[in-house]
Every structure is written in structure tokens, then in C-alpha cells.
Image (cartoon, helix red, strand yellow):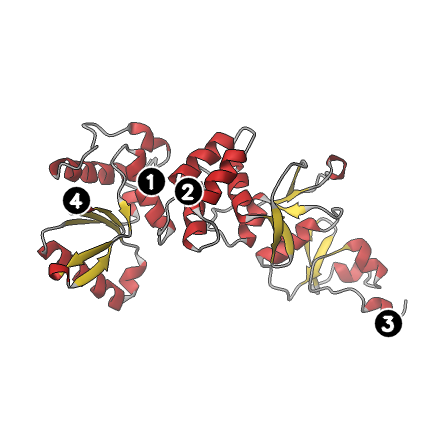
Amino acid sequence: MTLEAITTLDTRVPFTRADALKAGITASQLRSSAYVAMHQGIYVASDVEVTPRIRALAALQGFPAGAFASHATAGRLWELPLPTLPDEHVTVADRKHRRRRPGIVCHSPRRAVIGTKGEVPCTSSAQTFVDLADQLSLVDLVVVGDHLVRKGICKVRQLVEAAARATGSSAEHARLAASLVRPKVDSPMESRLRLLLVLAGLPEPDVNPLVSTDGGLTMRKYDLCWLKARFIVEYDGRHHIERVEQWESDLTRREAIDDDGWRIIVVTADGIYKNPGETVAKVHRLLRERRVPGTPVMTDPGWQRHFPGRS
């Protein structure tokens, strides 16, 4: 084996065992600490950071040309806020190219909009949103959609159109999620808070509107707002406790709006994950007190399927 042959393999991107042996790397060397097995028969140099791009390239190794990253693997490439989804996902161009591999879910060929992200062939952002309907809950899927729109990667219209073209068992799920995606959502927790209230049948608030205070001299932004009722709901993450300046700024902002005749309530993570019923009840009561049009006499219990709260 010549030195030229040994140096033709770039071990800083995933490679197959066959390619390694061909390049002069022995089986014993592959088992050493110099390399990490990404999948059965797929390796990379051990000092390489395992990023979503490296994970996707490793999953695609061994599949013929035309295969592309999809579902959660494409979602990670698009840097979407996903829950833990351990498997990688590859879609092949021809059914006969399907392979069974531990840790890799191989999907049948289908019509899909594909491109590249980080030089990796993968589904488009809108197509990835639709595909993730197979894997994510309604709330998590809307979080993804809100993120795509907020980051300027997609428009709401594109997600709605992609979902409208979808077929299969998760198509209706994708369409419902797309219908709930909104622009200007600043964080996943804002998405969750909004969905908790909307799925409870409460009137939908404006998202991050600019509200004038001090007789119109100051414009401030608030998470969720029913403008005509002068009622605001804000999410407050625990990270603010560690950011004193941000915390003080938020307090000043809230005091100013309270002094101007508005009502504002603050919801923390516990009010979404542990005690969502208390959050729904409080917001519902205040919406009724402020006579917000469309506020039901009783909330819709359907929200409980999506926000089970403390067991």
C-alpha cells in the first residue's frame, strides 16, 4: 500500500470500513481510540466534533446517490428546536435501495422538495416541517413552525402550502400545526404558552405587539396581548433570574404598563409544564372580567391532551 493511497481518505468526515481498509487503515486501527464508530461499519476520527452535519453524513454513508437526510436528521441540520429524537432518518430515491441499519430509519421514495444544508442533501425547511408531523406532537410541531418563520427561513404561507400537499397518516396533523403557526414568536416557550391558551378555546392574542405607554411616548413589546381589553400575558424564563439587568428592565416595563391601566400577568415554566390548569383558569377569568369577545363560559378541556401537567 503506497503512502498516496493511505492519504486519500479524509477521516474527518464519516467513512465506511471498506473505504478505510482500501486506504490502508487496518481493522485494528479502526478499533483504536483514534476513531469512533458512528454506526455499524461507519467511522470518523475521534477528535471530530459530532455535529448534526457529521451525524447526517454518517447516516448517509453506504446509501446510493440520490439518498437524502429527512425528518429529524434534516431538522437538526436546519437547527430546529427539537425534543430528543435519537434515530437518524434517510430517504432513498428508489425502493430497492432501502437498507436496515441500527439507529437509522430508512424511508421509502416519495415526492419531496430537497436541497442542501451544510453541503448535505436534505429536505427543504418546509418539507422537513411536514415530515416531522410523523414524529412530533402538535405543540412541538408548532414550536418548529414558529421558529422557522421567526428566523426568516420560511413564511407561514409556505408551511401551509407544504402541509396542504402532504399525504399519508400524518397529513392532517401537519395541516393543523401549520394553521397554528404565527409570525413574530420569540421563543419556544412563548409558542407553548400561546398554544395552551388557544387550545383551551380562549380568544387568540396578538403576538409581541408594540403597545404605547406614557401617553404614547413609549412603545413596548409584550408576549401575548388582547389590545382592546388592555390585557397582557407574558412568559418569564428562569434565566432572567441570572440576568439582573434584564430582570430589572422587565420589572420596569411591567410597572409602567400597570400604571397605565393595563392588567398584566406573568407565567413561568411551572405554569406551562406543572400547573397548566391554573394558568388557563386565571387567564380565562381575567378575559371574562374584561369582557373580551369570544371568551367562552367554559374552557375547552382538549388542552389537557397536549399539556398534561403534574402527574
Q: Which residue is mark 3?
A: 3
Callout 3: helix, strand or loop?
helix
Q: Which residue is mark 2?
A: 142
| Residue 215 coordinates in the image, percent (x, y) | 11, 60
Q: Which residue is mark 4?
A: 228
Q: Does the rendering let one see residue 286?
A: yes
Instruction: Describe residue 269's horizontal placement relative to residue 127 as left or right.
Output: left
Q: Amino acid at mark 3?
A: Leu
Q: Which residue is mark 1?
A: 195
Quarter holding residue 204? top left
Asked whether disc 1 touches disc 4, contact meaning CB atoms under 8 Å apart, the reply is: no
Q: CA distance from mark 3 to mark 4?
A: 76 Å
Quarter holding residue 128? top right
Q: CA distance from mark 1 to mark 3?
A: 60 Å
Q: CA distance from mark 2 to mark 3?
A: 53 Å
| Residue 151 coordinates in the image, percent (x, y) | 44, 55
The residue drawn where x is 45% and y is 48% is 155
Callout 1: helix, strand or loop?
helix
Image quadrant containing the C terminus: top left
Instruction: Describe residue 17's horizontal placement relative to residue 186 as left or right.
Output: right
The residue drawn where x is 51% and y is 54% is 79
Q: Amino acid at mark 1?
A: Leu
Q: Does the rendering let one see residue 85?
A: no
Q: Amino acid at mark 2?
A: Val
> Nearer the viewer's eye, disc 1 or disc 4?
4
